Amino acid sequence: MSTPLPDVRMSPAAAVGLVASREISTRVKSKAFRVATVVMLLLIVVGILLIKLVSGGGGADSTVGYTPATAAFSAPLKASGQAVDESIDLTQVADEAAGRAKLADGSIDALLTGDGKTVHVQVKKDLDGKLSNVLQLLSRQVALDQQISALGGNPAQFQAAIASATFVEDPPLEQPYDYNGQQLVLGIAAGILIYLSLMINGQSVAQGVVEEKTSRVVELLLSTIKPWQLMAGKVLGIGVVGLIQMLVIGAGGVITGLAAGVLTISVSAAVGTVVWLIVWYLLGFFMYSIVFAALGALVSRQEDVGGATMPALMFVIAGYVVGISVLPSDPGNTFVEVLSVIPVFAPTLMPMRLAMGGVPVWEAVLSVGLVVLMIPGLIWLAARIYRNAVMRSGAKVKLRDALRAA
C-alpha cells in the first residue's frame, strides 16, 4: 500500500502572512523608506524646536519710549494695551533726541513726543497696526479726560468708576470645553500625519498592484494563492510598514515636545493622542487601502494609478481640508462633528478632534464602530473587483465589468 502524500497546500492565513512578510521586508529595507522616515521625523523635530525658539523670548509685543513731558501717558498706554491684549513695555528717555537715537538703533518701536497735551508718536519707518489701535484708544481717553476736566469733573474718579463697572454672567445652558493652543496643535499634527500616511501608503498599495500586474508576477503568485489572499497580504504588509513609520514619527515628535518644554500637557494626554493616532491610522489605512488595491487592479500602467484612485482620494483630501481650515478657528463646529462620524471622513477628522479633546465618548465609539462595520463590506467588494480585474492587462478595465461575476 502506497503512503499518501502530505497536504502541502498553504492555509489562507499562511498565504496572507507570506505576502505580508515579503512586503514588509522589501519596503523596510528600501532606502526610500528610511530616507522618507528620517526626513519626516527631522521636520517634526525641527518644527518643534523652532516653536520653542519663537515662543521662548516671552517679550512684549511693542516697546514704547516716553519723555518726561509725556510721562503722564505711560500708565494709560499700558492699560489701553491690556484692554486689547497687546503687551507693551515702556521705557523713559531723557529727551526726544535720546528717544530718536533709540528708535534708530531699534531699541524701541515707537516714541511718544510733544508737550503731553495730545498724543504724538514717532517711529523709525512704519507704525505697527496693533500698536496703532492702542494709541488710538489712548488718544480717545486723553480727549475724554480733557473734556471731563473742562466740565469741572475729576478724570481719575471717572476712570475708576468705569474700571470698576462689570457685568454678571449667568451659568451657560451647556458647559463649554476649554480648548488650549497645544491641543489644537496636536490635533492638526495628528490630522496631517494621518493624511500623509493615507496618501503615501495607500497609493503604495495601488502602485504595488500595478507593478506586479505589469511585470506578470501576479500570474505566478495567483497560480499558488487566491486573489483575495494576495490583496490582503499586500494591504497588511504595507499597513505594518506605515504603522512603523507612524510610531517613529509620532513618538519622536511627542518626546521632543515634552523634552523641549513646548508640550506642557500631561504625559498621559500625549500618550493618549499617539494611541488614537495609531488606532485611526489602522482603521483609515485598511478601509482605504483595500479600495486602492481594487482600483489599482483596474489599470495596467503606473501613470494611470492617480486617475484610478482619485475618486477615493477625494474623500481623504476633503476631510483633511475641512479639518485644518475649520477646526483651528472653531473647534466645536457642528458640521465637522457630523462629518467626523461618517466613515469616509472619520480617519482624518476624528483624530484631530480627539487630540483637541472634548469629544463625547459616544461619538468616538460610534465613529470607530461604523468604520469597523464598513470594512468587511469593502473587503468583499474590493476582492470581487480585484479578482476580476487583476489578470486583465491592456486597456483600463471598466468598474462595472470588474463587478460582474468571473
Image (cartoon, grey):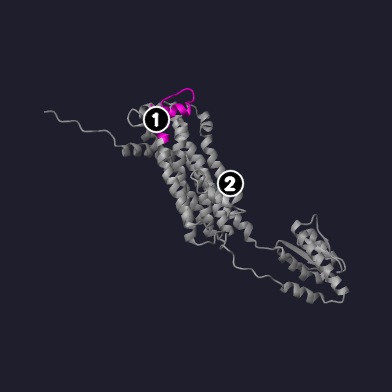
Upstream in the sequence, badge 2 or badge 1?
A: 2
Q: Which residue is mark 2?
A: 322
Look at 59% across and 48% down and name the residue there.
Answer: 324
Q: Is residue 75 visible?
A: yes
- Is residue 308 rendered to the left or right of residue 124? left
Q: Amino acid at mark 2?
A: Val
Look at 68% across and 70% down and name the residue there.
Answer: 167
Instruction: Point out residue 340 in the picture as x, y percentages from the top left corner.
Output: 52, 49
Find out whether the residues at labels 2 and 1 contact each other: C-beta distance under 8 Å: no
Residue at far top of view:
394
Look at 55% across and 38% down and name the residue there.
Answer: 314
Q: Which residue is mark 1?
A: 387
Span shown in magenta: 381-406
- Is residue 347 rendered to the left or right of residue 328? left
Look at 55% across and 45% down and name the residue there.
Answer: 319
Res 104 quadrant in image:
bottom right
Q: Amino acid at mark 1?
A: Arg
**Pick the front one: 227 or 346:** 346
* The C terminus lies in quadrant: top left
- Secondary structure beneath dot 2 equals helix
Confirm whether the magenta stretch covers residue 382.
yes
Residue 221 vertical position relative to residue 267 in the rendered view, above or below: above
Q: Is residue 29 visible?
A: no
**Pick the front one: 341 or 140:** 341
